[in-house]
Image: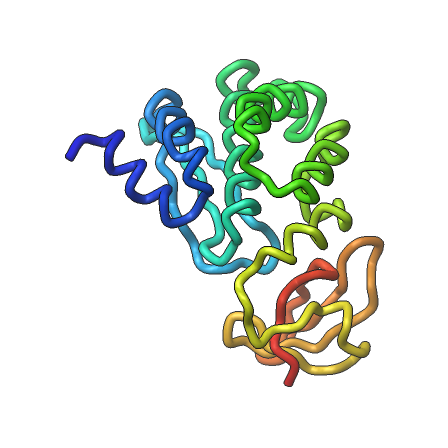
């Protein structure tokens, strides 16, 4: 099995089928390594430029629904494209990145992959993409409707100072700081910032 075929096989597990061929070709064309990670508090995905002769690397959380996974992956590929064009000479989420993101999203939007409510929310978000799709609560709320059923709740629904669990670790919910909640891990006393719509288990 060649690399392109392997890419398609992996992607079928995580993104809508209509986008598999295009994204598999992008992985091959841009020559990056895609790593699927367990859920993380602070991010859905990230991009690392080539270091010491290694390939570009993109990581995506494994618990995202297919639409969120695809949107996050394109977000990170836009960082890669921006790095190829400008190196480290531009801001991470500046105008150059926004242009790259919009450029990559155009062929995907033409495929009519998304349900109408998701599509409309993405169109609104793409008018001025932010550093994270998490910062657009309208988009996040609509995307969450397509998550698999679970025993979790959104952090925003829990009272302040209550205990909750995330990734088998216990936290205390603190105050909301602009768009995220300032929480303390019970064991280490370290501070973490959670999105309002983070899915957690009530203690």
Q: Quick check: 177 left or right of 44?
A: right
Point out residue 140 in the picture as x, y percentages from the top left corner: 69, 51
* Identity of the residue furthest to the left in this view: 1
Q: Report the quarter where the N terminus lies.
A: top left
Say whether residue 132 is visible: no
- Residue 148 x/y as whole percent: 53, 63
110 with respect to 132 (left or right): left
- Is 150 in front, or is 188? 150
Q: Residue at x 69, y 68 (%)?
A: 154
Q: Which residue is at 50% across, 59% downward?
A: 39
Tell me the colour scheme of the image: rainbow
Q: Residue at x 67, y 30 (%)?
A: 93
Query: Farthest top residue?
Result: 85
The picture places residue 107, in percent across and down from the top left corner, at 54, 22
Confirm whether residue 161 shows in the render.
Answer: yes
Asked if residue 14 is positioned above or below residue 203 in the image, the reply reads above
Report which quarter residue 131 is drawn in: top right
Q: From the viewer's perspective, is residue 203 above or below residue 73?
A: below
Residue 22 vertical placement versus 159 (above, below):
above
Q: Quadrant of the C terminus?
A: bottom right
**Residue 54 in picture, x, y percent from top left:** 32, 31
Q: Between 103 and 78, which is closer to the camera in this rendering? A: 103
- The residue sitting at 76% across, 50% down in the picture is 137
Q: Residue 72's image quarter?
A: top right
Comparing 133 with 22, the one in front is 22
Q: Is residue 65 left or right of residue 99?
A: left
Q: Is residue 2 above or below residue 181?
A: above
Classify residue 169 by image quadrant.
bottom right
């Amino acid at each position: 099995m060649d690399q392109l075929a392997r890419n398609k096989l992996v992607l079928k597990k995580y993104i809508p089928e209509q986008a598999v061929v295009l994204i598999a070709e992008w992985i091959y064309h841009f020559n990056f390594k895609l790593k699927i990670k367990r859920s993380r508090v602070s991010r859905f995905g990230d991009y690392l430029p080539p270091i010491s002769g290694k390939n570009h690397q993109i990581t995506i959380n494994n618990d995202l629904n297919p639409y969120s996974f695809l949107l996050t992956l394109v977000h990170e590929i836009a960082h890669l494209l921006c790095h190829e064009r400008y190196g480290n000479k531009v801001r991470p989420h500046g105008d150059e990145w926004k242009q790259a993101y919009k450029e990559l999203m155009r062929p995907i939007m033409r495929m009519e992959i998304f349900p109408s409510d998701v599509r409309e929310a993405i169109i609104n978000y793409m008018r001025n993409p932010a550093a994270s799709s998490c910062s657009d609560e309208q988009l996040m709320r609509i995307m969450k409707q397509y998550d698999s059923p679970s025993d979790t709740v959104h952090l925003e629904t829990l009272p302040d100072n209550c205990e909750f669990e995330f990734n088998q670790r216990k936290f205390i919910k603190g105050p909301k700081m602009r768009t995220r909640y300032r929480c303390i891990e019970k064991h280490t006393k370290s501070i973490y910032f959670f999105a309002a719509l983070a899915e957690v288990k009530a203690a």
